Amino acid sequence: MSAPIISVRNLTKRFGDFTAVDQLAIDVVPSSIFAFLGANGSGKSTTIRMLIGLLRPTEGSIEVDGIDVIRHPRRVRDHIGYMGQKVSLYQGLSLRENVEFYAGLHGLAGRELEARWGALRERFRLSDAEAERPENLPAGIRQRAGLALATLHRPRVLFLDEPTAGVDVHSRSLFWELIREEADAGRTVFVTTHFLEEVDYCDWASFIDEGKLIANAAPEDLRRRYSEGYRVHIDGEPAQELTTPALDDAFFADELDPLLALRPGARVQIDTPSMTDVFRRVIAESAGTRHAQP
Amino acid sequence: MNLRRLWTLLVREARATWRNAFTMTILVAVPLAALMVFGFVLSTEVKKLRLGVHDASGTASSRRLVAELAAKGTFVPRSFATPGSLDHALMEGEISAAIVIPPDFDRRLREAAAGGAPAELQVLYDGGETVLAGNSEAFLRTLALSTVAELSTGARAQTMGGPAAPLRVSPPAAAPPVSGGVSVVSRALFNPKLDGSRFMVSGTFGFVLSFLTALITAVSIVSERLSGTFEQLQVTPATSLEILLGKILPLGAVFAVDVVLMVLAAGFLLGVWPEGSIVFFVIVSSFYVLTSLSLGLLISATSATAAEAVQKTVLFSIPLVQLSGFAFPIRNMPTPVRWLAEIFPATHYIRVSRAIYLRGEGPLSLLPELALLTFFTLVLVAVALRSIEGRA
Amino acid sequence: MSVEPSLRLRGLRKSFGKRRALDGIDLTLEGPQIVGIVGPDGAGKTTLLRAIAGLLEITADEATVLGFDLRGDVRALKAQIGYVPQSFSLHRDLSVSENLRFTARLHRLSNAEFERRAELLLARTGLSPFLDRPAGALSGGMKQKLSIANALLPKPALLVLDEPTAGVDVMARDEIWRILEERRSEALVLISTSYLEETEACDRLIYLDEGCVVAQGTPAELRAQVPVKLLRAWGNDPRAIARAAGSLPYVVSARVRGPFARIEIAADAPGEARLRADFAGFAPRVWLVEPTPVDMESALLFLSRKQSPRTGAP
């Protein structure tokens, strides 16, 4: 297991009497997609602002790509790309001019920029939009443009805050393909979203509630822990049903295949616990624990 | 500081500003409009003032006095048969000022020439229009005195000292003290025609460059903060100083052009040119622009919305106009208020601006004021930088 | 006067300058139900909702909402509508209760009526503990709930909501939908949404694109229209499976979705047997190819693809 590229320990932020973030500890593995989830007002945005060096924590430590973010917030800026909830494109400037602007700030220009942007433009399907101004572009394209700008300077880590909010199904799907390509290229993606089914695109998910971490595992492990498991229906006389916490080699080899061998051609249907249901359960259990405490 | 990054920031800000037709129109039209309004229309110059005259004397001397008053074109005399009708006309606003020549005017003049008590002339004016009134009163006083002196001695009046003043103008409120029969009459040394135009024009620069710069900057930055692009900037390698300069230099360039335009407009359209060096004036004004822009930055840092930024700028500008010496002389204000005025950078700039326009002063004599302005600028820039850092 | 929750639109058009936002909408809805408005960005969803809420000047062959003519005087119509726009539009410096009281007065609700309705709505939305808090100080989800409670206060016959759950977390979304479902039997509820789960919960769906109604029907009807078959391929390495599947000629799309690869094949194509055969010797192993009923995602993706030639999307 390689060393984490983001390492957070005892992260705490207090605003007067109010504790927004409480002793958070997270490790993010390089080249992975890490989903950071939470309700509105749960401390999610506060945490992200601390991770990118815009907010000073009350306590704790943050290390991103080997840099102590609290002591050297400026040093980390060339290592990260950020896409905030509000669009980062300047109105009154074309998309191309926006690209030149952000590239210039990172010291990227001339032929190097041309090569990099040319490739991105192709992959992100932004060629038609290059000369347009952001206010004239639909949300899906703006979001992809925002992602392209964030990754332009080849940062090691991408922080994306609700990048698919308000985007339609088709554009969202394409967007996540692009995120996966970024991770394949070696970038680590730290992303938040309210579309919980998108967690299935991610390698890891952690959930914050009232400033505390209440879940922190791979999606499949969360399913295992916070759901009734997969229900497998097999047609036939009589119909059969199997339940399993996880669909793995063991289940298929030892349980399902033998059954199917007895009923060749039988239809199989698998009920998958949705991530949305998984998180409903996560929250319910957390609330239950909280109410149980005096 | 990285020059390429700064250049990138400058280019973006310039593009965004110059493409915004509305902002550009405001940036050019408002200064010129203000110049025209303040310098031309609202000039506190005394010209063609309707003067009511009640000549109870009706002698050669009194008629001569009235003729002299009319001669220079400053006053347009109108006769009134009775003091009552004069009062009435003054109250109705038909006349702006009035003089009453008493019946014994001629006799008293001759007596005064022979060493007796001075003759008296009553001046009435609309006290509501204080600035105008003050000017016109002073003017009347001077003119009347010099005319009468001429009449009695047959020679041009002396400005200081000289023989017993043959005339006392009442009310004596701000009148020169009479002691030993000598009445000191002052004359406005550096604005002999009491020409309000030059005074107002030089002050207008201060007003426009203080108010408009702060306003445009504050609104622009708040809008950027609200749209999310500012937060995005904070996550790039750009330093706070680069961000600050990237914002104010392009705007500063536009305002510097504004200054040149205003100087030219004042010169060609109003006939008002600075007594001193135009180049020096433009340089100092451009420097003051930076001061004002930093202030605008500060206002935006403390405002949540553009509307709030506008409100704050306007609120700040009202005392600015009252206290900076733009329209009202600071001299006449109570001491604590005068000290307050000294805190405004605008006050100092207006002083410098007037010094160059009216008296033709140069860098050496203005050094203390310039040093003070520099100090203000550095403080404002430092505070503005802190606000850009913005880490809670 | 009880108002019939229905609307009839024929040839509804709206332009902003040169841009045609609505290009001839034909839509008939009768009776209380929850209707979802879906479609790509820029399709005209917000414009349509605003038009129905009586906020825009429109041209149409026919435009009757709750029995009122949209093209005429809409003041009486507005008394019967609850409208929740995309961005928070209540008074930020007024408290929760003050905002509700303000709306009650606008609609001339009696004090008793207001007290009763407000208590009910506040309980349902969980806003009771925040009665005196300024609306601007509420969190995003609570603001949305307040907007909805506010819209529901006068018991409108028509409720129009523009992406009320955008950016709202799952708990608050659940609560909002519980409230909406209570109105299902009495009011006509029009809601635009980008959450797939929510589209399944609607009685009827309207798919908009480029200012026109491209498809409409119950979720089941919309799904049935899709000429693809959906299969899930389960295996240890769904990514590899998806990649391999994507290169097969009869596969329309292949995407990874957690533990499985989601594969769409043309409805008239060979079918799962062929896919099974093609993956028989695949390594790493494909455990199972499972045909699954077409879901909303496939339906919506198909509808957006259908429009692609015209819009040049994505």
Image (cartoon, coloured by chain):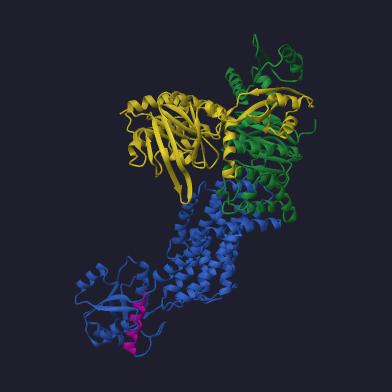
Chain colours: A green, B blue, C yellow
Viewer-closest of C187 and C90: C187
Viewer-closest of C118 and B382: C118
What span is in magenta? B138-153
Is B140 part of what is drawn in magenta? yes
Is A34 part of what is drawn in magenta? no
Q: Is residue C287 above or below residue B139?
A: above
Q: Is residue A171 above or below residue C157?
A: below
| Residue lying at the far bottom of the rendered structure | B154
Q: Is residue C169 above or below residue B355?
A: above
Taking B197 as reference, is C288 left or right? Answer: right
Q: How far across and down, in percent of the image, does residue C107 sit?
A: 34, 34
Q: Residue B321's image quarter? A: bottom left
What secondary structure do most residues of the magenta stretch adopt? Answer: helix
Viewer-closest of C263 and A201: C263
Quadrant (top left/top right/bottom left/bottom right) for the N terminus of chain B: bottom right
- Asked whether residue A162 is in view, the answer is no
